[in-house]
Image (spheres, helix red, strand yellow):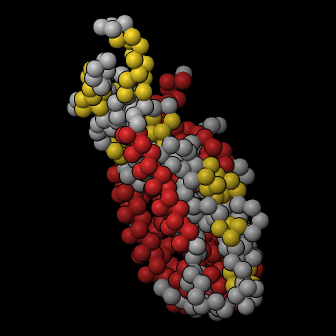
């Protein structure tokens, strides 16, 4: 197979070489009227990188001269001048190939953007459950499509397609939980399987994002939020996907998370991510590695108010998450099932009832420390002044302009 590929490449190269050699020996011709003899002559064209300085006559061949600086000729031709190279690349473009005598300057949108009507727009990002059937390129936008049966995507990306579910049977392992559009199948007893909890919104992100949800929502929320955020805005298709079947608070969480992802180069986003990372590291230190059993995790979830996390979900999380992440993943799942209720308030409610179930005291204490830490974390007050007041002021100014 490799020999055939090598032979094909060799033949292709030889074909190109033969073509150029023949053109040099037998250049393409063009018709030219010789005023001195009043005859129509067949003159040789000039090769790439040159122009016709003097047409042929009955006694001499065409005289070709090199293209001047900042000019090029990409093909054999019969014109008396070379083409002028494009001036400069546009905003958010870089020079992929500099101008030379045979090629125009080639500009391309920077990574993560594509050219559309003279502007480099950001690629659409496919949400979890959707894969890139056509990844974004410098010339075209991403095309997202919901993952079909047997496939999944657990990340937000403009490049990653849906991947096939893990085949536990083929690996000789029982299936602990079947995959869906946004999660892979989990095989029981597979020590090599990478543990990925895929926590959608962490406790630290939730504590920060809640500041962005006003007490009284406007009729057009969260569109007002999208229009007011600095940097690149969330596109209308992504907004529509987020709005389907979710309340305003959950929509806000998802929009802010997507906005943060699309504006990673913004200084304010970098600062937010740094502080959230520090917060999450502290939360993990507080929670530690409790190594709770299925029954203990079930008791913890049953102590929370509202809709309960199903037993099969607890089993799946026990199999697919590391001990330090199991509680965090379950709390994230509880928040989603209860339409964005405040996780910290739910956890505080549950901590009051855990003693009667002989729940490990060390875990209760670590959870209390986590709640206290998140309630007292000063970065949220900082961002309420630095970032969210900016958002609210832009919302108010937008409203005033509409009056």
* Residue 189 sits above or below residue 6 on the image: below
Determine whether, in the image, residue 77 is placed left or right of residue 123. left
Tell me: residue 130, above or below residue 124.
below
Percent x, y for residue 219? 65, 37
> Residue 389: in sight, yes or no?
no
Q: Give the quadrant of the N terminus.
A: bottom right
Percent coordinates x, y for residue 234 in the rendering: 54, 45
Of all residues, the one furthest to the left in this rendering is 69
Of residues 362 and 137, the one nearer the viewer is 137
Where residue 226 appears, as percent x and y from the top left, is 53, 42
Nearer to me, 55 or 196: 55
Residue drawn at point x = 50 percent, y = 73 percent: 371
Residue 340: image quadrant is bottom right
Residue 77 appears at what percent x and percent y?
39, 28
Front one among 356 and 31: 31
Q: In the drawing, does residue 382 fall left or right of residue 194?
A: left
Q: Quadrant of the C terminus?
A: top right
Residue 106 vertical placement versus 169 (above, below): above
186 sits left or right of 56 in the view: right
Residue 154 sits in quarter: bottom right
Q: Nearer the viewer, residue 273 or 330?
A: 273
> Could you tell me which residue is drawn at 31 percent across and 35 percent down?
49
- Whether residue 30 can be seen here: yes
Q: Residue at x 62, y 49 (%)?
A: 143
Residue at the image position 62 percent from the left and 81 percent from the top: 320
User: Would residue 385 appear left or right of 343 to someone viewing this image?
Assistant: left
């Amino acid at each position: 197979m490799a020999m055939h590929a090598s032979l094909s490449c060799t033949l292709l190269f030889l074909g190109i070489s033969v073509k150029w050699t023949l053109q040099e020996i037998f250049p393409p011709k063009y018709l030219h009227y010789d005023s001195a003899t009043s005859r129509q002559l067949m003159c040789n064209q000039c090769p790439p990188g040159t122009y016709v300085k003097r047409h042929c006559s009955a006694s001499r061949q065409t005289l070709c001269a090199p293209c001047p600086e900042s000019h090029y000729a990409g093909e054999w031709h019969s014109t008396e001048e070379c083409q002028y190279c494009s001036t400069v690349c546009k905003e958010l473009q870089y020079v992929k190939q500099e101008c030379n005598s045979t090629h125009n300057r080639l500009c391309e949108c920077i990574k993560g953007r594509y050219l559309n009507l003279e502007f480099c727009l950001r690629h659409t990002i496919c949400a979890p459950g959707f894969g890139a059937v056509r990844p974004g390129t410098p010339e075209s936008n991403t095309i997202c499509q919901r993952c079909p049966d047997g496939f999944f995507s657990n990340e937000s990306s403009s490049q990653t397609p849906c991947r096939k579910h893990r085949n536990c049977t083929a690996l000789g392992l029982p299936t602990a939980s079947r995959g869906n559009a946004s999660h892979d199948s989990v095989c029981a007893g597979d020590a090599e399987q990478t543990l990925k909890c895929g926590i959608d919104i962490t406790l630290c992100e939730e504590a920060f994002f809640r500041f962005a949800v006003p007490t009284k929502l406007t009729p057009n929320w969260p569109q007002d939020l999208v229009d007011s955020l600095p940097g690149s805005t969330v596109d209308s298709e992504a907004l529509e996907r987020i709005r389907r079947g979710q309340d305003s608070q959950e929509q806000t969480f998802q929009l802010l998370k997507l906005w943060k992802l699309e504006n990673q180069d913004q200084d304010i986003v970098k600062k937010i991510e740094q502080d959230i990372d520090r917060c999450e590291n502290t939360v993990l230190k507080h929670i530690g590695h409790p190594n709770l059993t299925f029954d203990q995790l079930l008791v913890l979830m049953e102590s929370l108010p509202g809709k309960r996390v199903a037993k099969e979900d607890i089993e799946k999380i026990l199999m697919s998450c590391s001990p330090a992440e199991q509680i965090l993943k379950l709390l994230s799942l509880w928040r989603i099932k209860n339409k964005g209720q405040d996780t910290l308030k739910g956890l505080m409610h549950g901590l009051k009832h855990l003693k009667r179930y002989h729940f490990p005291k060390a875990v209760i204490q670590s959870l209390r420390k986590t709640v206290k830490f998140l309630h007292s974390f000063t970065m949220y007050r900082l961002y309420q002044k630095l970032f969210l007041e900016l958002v609210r002021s832009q919302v108010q100014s937008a409203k005033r302009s509409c009056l």
